Amino acid sequence: MMKPWTDAELERLLAEPEHQESPLLPALQWLQQREQTQRKQLEKLLRIADCSDGLARSQTQDLLGQYDKQLRRLEKITRISDRYQHNLMALNEQLKQAAQQDPLTKLANRRLLLARLGEEVERCRRGTKPFVMVMLDVDYFKRINDNFGHETGDRALCMMAETIVQQLRGYDLCARWGGEEFLLLLPETGLEQATHIVERVMAAVRALRLAKDETIRLSISAGLAIYQPDENVDFTISRADAALIQAKNNGRDQLQVALA
Ligand SMILES: Nc1nc2c(ncn2[C@@H]2O[C@H](COP(=O)(O)OP(=O)(O)OP(=O)(O)O)[C@@H](O)[C@H]2O)c(=O)[nH]1
């Protein structure tokens, strides 16, 4: 292949005196000029192309950077919103619990017990064994408050609540019905089994000792009523209450069973 001419070599060649008379000289000079002009234009175009390529690349980098930033922002917002939702759910759960719980003893309150009672009545309608209600009342509780103070009274109530629950089965429910009154709901339970549970509860309360006050003796009286099919539950509760009054009148620390 022929070696390419440089501009200087070409110019030197065309300027040699022996070629000055050649008829091709003007045509060759014209061609050399045109080639130089075209080369310069090409170089200029390449420079512009390089430049716009660099610009496009830096614009792409910019966009990628912005996209990354937005993505990180979005992740942060998602994390915050997840945490917020989680807190909201926990708060809802706490509120729900608080609405169904006695604040002192942490037992179920009346509202929860009545809701569970409704479910038990429904279950009985479907033909299962009836449930039992037991009204419990602490004996001579006023004396504990009077002799040892209200705080000790509160502590005694909490300990009794805990002790009662420990004697129950997992599906039984103990609610704080009033000041020193508790109401037990024993689902699908016969008289014999219910009597056994209540006696166990009474024995456990009798054995309770308040840490420092060894002299304090606790006992409870109980009234038991078996739910009668199609009976209004308010009536079952009042039968249990009447039996409790009887237990108190008979000397306390005992169980009385209500007539059907
Ligand atoms: N410490 C404390 N005392 C309470 C609470 N609720 C009710 N009491 C007290 O419980 C006592 C109940 O007294 P009474 O109804 O006379 O009955 P009792 O002294 O237990 O006697 P009997 O039920 O007849 O055996 C009252 O002194 C109330 O102030 C409470 O949440 N905390």
Image (cartoon, rainbow, N blue to C red):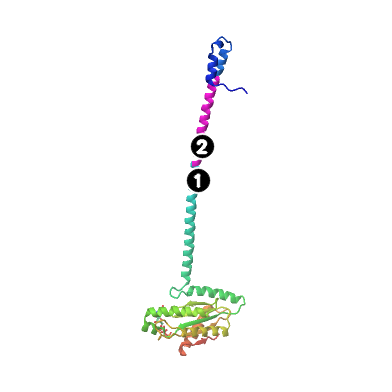
Q: Which residue is at a point 49% across and 57% down the rendered structure image?
A: 82
- In the image, residue 152 lies at what x, y percent? 39, 80
The answer to whether any part of residue 143 appears in the image is yes
Query: Vertically, is 54 above or below 181?
Result: above
Considering every residue shown, the one lying at the far top of the view is 21
Circle 2 residues within 10 Å: few <14, some 14–19, many ≥20: few
The answer to whether any part of residue 242 appears in the image is no
Residue 52: in magenta span: yes
- Secondary structure at badge 2 equals helix
- In the image, residue 33 lies at what x, y percent? 53, 18
- In the image, residue 95 lies at what x, y percent? 46, 67
Q: Assign the magenta stretch its main secondary structure.
A: helix
The answer to whether the residues at label 2 and label 1 have Cβ atoms under 8 Å apart is: no
Q: Which residue is at a point 50% across and 47% down the rendered structure image?
A: 68
Q: Earlier in the sequence, mark 2 or mark 1?
A: 2
Q: Which mark is residue 67?
A: 1
Q: Which residue is mark 2?
A: 56
Q: Which residue is at a point 54% across and 74% down the rendered structure image?
A: 118
Instruction: Give the CA separation, mark 2 to mark 1.
Output: 16 Å
Q: Which of the image's four quarters has the N terminus?
A: top right
- In the image, residue 211 lies at what x, y percent? 41, 81
| Closer to the camera in the image, 217 or 97 | 217
